[in-house]
Image (cartoon, coloured by chain):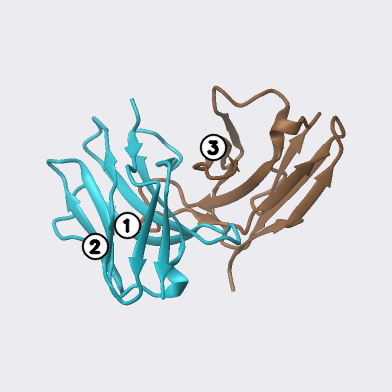
Chain colours: A cyan, B brown
């Protein structure tokens, strides 16, 4: 079974509008972390936001927020006020703390395209 | 600035000719990772070093080897590249799990072409 599922291979959003990128996960480990990374066409993976499984509040970093619904095992990324520079691949990833080494499992990614 | 550096950014090699990709870091992180990423796919972990301990993923081909001579440097050796090994290779670092600094820091990647 997939540990991280991103069901939207591609999405369009109008500049200045908000967009939600979906991510669901599967783990039996009570302690885990969820990450979102942005990958522009240049290839570098850029860390955006993190949510720990025990965090009570949803994480926020500037225009990025993570809608964490633990019972549903979802960790959707919300980007407010989209900008043209937000066009990129977005990957959701999970770390399970039962594994040493801080390893990540990535979802298949969502390509976001921001329209002017 | 502290960072993860990968050289070269673009590498062209011939079918069957050994190639080495390098990664260095100034973050003093004790864990280093190598990922392979093919076009429009998620990064796939090949192996990682936890300090000097080498950890190979079960499905990583024997054709891929790695060396970590010290904390700062890690190398990916492809002994006999095939056409299917053409991909972006990403190096990443992190502190060990349990620390507050939890994310993986990625280098810019090396795009490998096999002719």
Query: What is the chain letter for disc 2?
Result: A
Q: If you read the primary sequence from the N terminus, does the residue marked by circle 2 or circle 1 appear first? A: 1
On the picture, is A1 further left or further right than A89?
left
Instruction: State the residue position of label 1.
Output: A50
Question: Which is nearer the eye, B61 or B84?
Answer: B84
Question: Which is nearer the eye, A89 or B49?
Answer: A89
Quadrant in the picture for the N terminus of chain B: bottom right
Q: Are marks 2 and 1 in contact (CB under 8 Å)?
A: yes
Instruction: State the residue position of label 3.
Output: B45
Badge 3 element: strand
Question: Which is nearer the eye, B11 or A34?
Answer: B11
Vertical order, A107 against B62 (above or below):
below
Vertical order, A82 against B114 (above or below):
below
Quadrant in the picture for the C terminus of chain B: top right
Query: What is the chain letter for disc 3?
Result: B
Indicate the position of residue A39 as horizontal and vertical percent values. 50, 58
Badge 2 element: loop
On the picture, is B41 further left or further right than A79?
right
How far, Cα to Cα, is label 3 from label 2? Answer: 26 Å
Instruction: State the residue position of label 2.
Output: A59
């Amino acid at each position: 079974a997939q540990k991280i599922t991103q069901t939207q291979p591609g999405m369009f959003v109008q500049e200045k509008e908000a967009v939600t990128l979906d991510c669901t996960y599967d783990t039996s480990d009570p302690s885990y972390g969820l990450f979102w990374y942005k990958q522009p066409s240049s290839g570098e993976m850029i860390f955006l936001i993190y949510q720990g499984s025990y965090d009570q509040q949803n994480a926020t970093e500037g225009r990025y927020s993570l809608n964490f619904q633990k019972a549903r095992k979802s960790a959707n990324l919300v980007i407010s006020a989209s900008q043209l520079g937000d066009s990129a691949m977005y990957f959701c990833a999970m770390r399970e703390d039962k594994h040493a080494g801080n390893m990540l499992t990535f979802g298949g990614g969502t390509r976001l395209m921001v329209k002017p | 600035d502290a960072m993860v550096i990968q050289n070269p950014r673009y590498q062209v090699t011939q079918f069957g000719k050994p190639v080495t990709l390098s990664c260095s870091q100034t973050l003093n992180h004790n864990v280093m990772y190598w990922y392979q990423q093919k076009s429009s796919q998620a990064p796939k972990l090949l192996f990682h070093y936890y300090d000097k301990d080498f950890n190979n993923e079960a499905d990583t081909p024997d054709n891929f080897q790695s060396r970590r001579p010290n904390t700062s440097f890690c190398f990916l050796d492809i002994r006999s590249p095939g056409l299917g090994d053409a991909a972006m290779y990403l190096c990443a670092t992190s502190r060990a799990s349990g620390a507050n600094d939890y994310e993986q820091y990625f280098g810019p990647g090396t795009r490998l072409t096999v002719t």
